[in-house]
């Protein structure tokens, strides 16, 4: 039988890029294309001890159905933590536990967008979120990212030209893939524009705690007096991505609709997983853990930048990120980027071709994304060295 | 700010029924309205031991990102198990791990339906699935359930009248809420009709292993030579609902699209949770466990039916189910069903008013749904006795 699929899913066609991305799972390849947290950053002993306690003391709570809003003690913990740490959470806000931050994007889109509605996003932006928006039949409008975040005048132009815009999607800290961090000035201007045009901001902050240099900036949500910012936080990068526990803080009217949506999509996030996160906060010093993993990522980021400077210094240009997991490198204008990526794969190094992160991924770009959290230190050294060898081929 | 929500989510309004359902969480109420598995049916010791092993031997596999299709050893285990147990799985089929069976309904709808497309369902049917279909803007067309399953001639009429039908949703075993099990004859006729009209069947089998009387019947998927049946299986009722692990077996073209959808909704089901299920199969006798919990549910079902016969025998009528979790009781025609339910709540017993399970829940019905898995034995005895007292008020 030839199945007829929905328009929204049919638009998510496998692309040439995905074929290249498949190469990232070739055995023995150096994974500079991935985005996995460093395994040495997982608090394995703590999770083991906590899980044991929960299954000894509260096994039925862990195994029985839970509620769609999430495990109440964890919701309380997150409220308190985000209030003290980020000044997030007004009287009109509420918190819901999600099965990973992608579910925040999923339910925000489901709740706010009809098919054909516009989502304004940074360009380049995280391919996973772009696909989530596409999977609801949304139209994407990209606004270029500068070194200090979204181009605000082009954002205003996009808002003017697209009156059916429902929300602006942004990753203000160590944006994926550009690594750019949005300045405080721009955070305020974007918030003011959202207010003016009556649209919501979807603020995705998965990497905020992975700052390895510079000063923390206030989240957009912290200046949200109107309840128009949906904030997505995650434990994937500071605790474990495999656990699939994240959270959303937003106006209670939005959370109420997202709860209805969550009930209809996966009922609730697994109880044991939520209880592990709660007990982790209760029994351990989460901020000390975050400091520790910042040390891990600082070392890896510095190693990668040093390697790039040494092996690719006269070939690529990049802005050194202050955190996150990625370095966004621009190849010389006369180099065919996709061919470069293919040559890297031939040398057993996987990187992501930059057009994967574009609204229209058939468009041309000179960028590639390198990840430093997944590979070992040797992987970083050997991987970037191999890229340097590919670069030499172009200099002949 | 007054938010404007999407049409599909706005249609999921809180209803009068939900207000009544809220009563089910009143402290001290006897929960005959719930649908939780009996806690004594959870293999707590096994889960505790397995989890400990996994976090000792494979902590990074448990905590790192996984793939959207699911943990490969578990996918293999399910393929083998379903082939030997249910004769499910042709060459064209594939399996994907889901975060609970609701996600199968969610992604099947997302993949197959545009807004306004028709889903044909049994009526009454599981409110959770109906809401999932509604959350994609689908039109629901109900086909009455008889004691041996869907009314086939009315199904054919519905297929004729609704050419934009994308799938037929059915729970063939111990249907929720009616308790009805579809005869083999009807399974074959419904499959033939689906083939004739070029629609898919979404076969939801959460209760199949909870058979306490009679003979097992073949699943519709087992007679699927064309690859038009999407089969949803779950570990919620035999292992743990709080773990949120389920699976879908369907034609590989459908699974490929569902995988793209899953990537965009929650990336993957938590790794630890999948590994627990895999190790449970590897290290324990799952079929023996199923036999054991069938004993638990047989006792509770018999107790509830005995109590109904004793306390409500001359008031309600019902067909004794051969399994599942529910007894579907019809009140006398001259009784106001919603008032009866409210009076039960006043006596601290929660039951579900039958119209919750209708396509149009403002329609009238004389049915209520009683659950025997959540309450203790005393809860069953005292709960049904209280319902008997409410009934007496009507007989005065």
Image (cartoon, coloured by chain):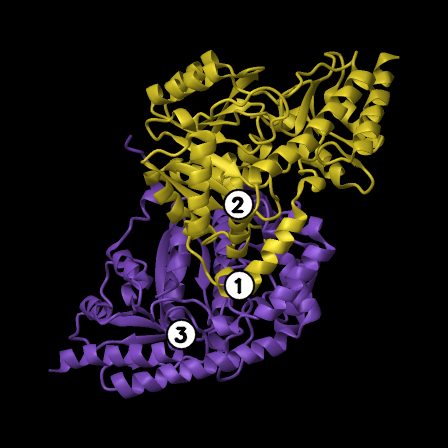
Chain colours: A yellow, B purple
- The reply, left or right, for residue B320 in relation to residue B107 is left
Residue tagged 2: A281
Give a yes or no on whether discs 2 and 1 share a subunit.
yes
Give the chain letter at badge 1. Answer: A
Residue tagged 3: B179
Quadrant into which the N terminus of chain A falls: bottom right
Q: Residue B291 at what x, y percent from top left?
A: 57, 80
Give a yes or no on whether discs 3 and 1 share a subunit.
no
- The reply, left or right, for residue B181 in relation to residue A286 is left
Q: Secondary structure at mark 2?
A: helix
Quadrant position of residue A110: top left
Q: Secondary structure at mark 3?
A: loop
Residue A130 marker: none
Q: Is residue B203 above or below residue A115?
A: below
Q: Secondary structure at mark 1?
A: helix
B300 or B352, nearer to the observer: B300
Give the chain letter at badge 3. Answer: B
Residue ID at (38%, 16%): A160
Residue ID at (38%, 71%): B151
Q: 10 Å neighbourhood of mark 2: few (<14), some, or many (≥20)? A: some
Residue A57 marker: 1
């Amino acid at each position: 039988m030839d199945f007829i699929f929905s328009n929204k899913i049919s638009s998510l066609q496998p692309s040439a890029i995905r074929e290249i991305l498949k190469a990232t799972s070739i055995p023995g390849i150096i994974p500079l294309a991935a985005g996995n947290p460093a395994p040495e950053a997982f608090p394995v002993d703590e999770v083991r001890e906590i899980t044991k306690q929960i299954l000894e003391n509260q096994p039925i709570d862990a195994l029985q159905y839970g509620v769609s809003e999430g495990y109440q003690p964890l919701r309380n913990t997150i409220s308190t933590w985000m209030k003290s740490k980020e000044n997030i959470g007004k009287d009109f806000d509420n918190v819901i536990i999600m099965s990973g931050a992608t579910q925040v994007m999923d339910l925000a889109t489901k709740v706010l967008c009809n098919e054909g509605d516009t989502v304004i996003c940074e360009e380049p932006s995280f391919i996973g979120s772009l696909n989530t928006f596409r999977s609801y039949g949304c139209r994407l409008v990209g606004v270029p990212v500068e070194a200090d975040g979204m181009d605000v005048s082009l954002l205003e132009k996009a808002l003017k030209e697209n009156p059916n815009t429902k929300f602006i999607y942004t990753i203000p800290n160590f944006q994926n893939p550009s690594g750019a961090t949005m300045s405080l000035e721009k955070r305020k201007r974007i918030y003011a524009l959202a207010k003016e045009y009556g649209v919501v901001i979807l603020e995705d902050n998965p990497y905020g705690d992975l700052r390895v240099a510079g000063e923390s900036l206030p989240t957009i949500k912290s200046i949200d007096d109107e309840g128009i910012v949906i904030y997505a936080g995650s434990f994937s990068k500071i605790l474990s991505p495999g656990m699939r526990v994240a959270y959303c803080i937003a106006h209670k009217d939005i959370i109420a609709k997202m709860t209805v949506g969550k009930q209809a999509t996966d009922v609730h996030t697994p109880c044991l997983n939520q209880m592990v996160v709660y007990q982790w906060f209760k029994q351990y010093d989460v901020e000390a853990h975050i400091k520790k993993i910042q040390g891990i990522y600082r070392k890896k980021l510095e190693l990668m930048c040093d390697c790039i400077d040494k092996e690719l210094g006269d070939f690529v240009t990049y802005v050194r990120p202050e955190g996150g997991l990625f370095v966004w490198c621009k190849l010389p204008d006369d180099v065919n980027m996709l061919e470069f990526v293919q040559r890297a794969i031939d040398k057993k190094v996987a990187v992501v071709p930059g057009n994967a992160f574009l609204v229209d991924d058939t468009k041309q770009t000179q960028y590639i994304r390198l990840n430093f959290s997944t590979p070992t230190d040797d992987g970083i050294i050997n991987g970037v060295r191999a890229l340097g060898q590919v670069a030499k081929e172009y200099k002949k």
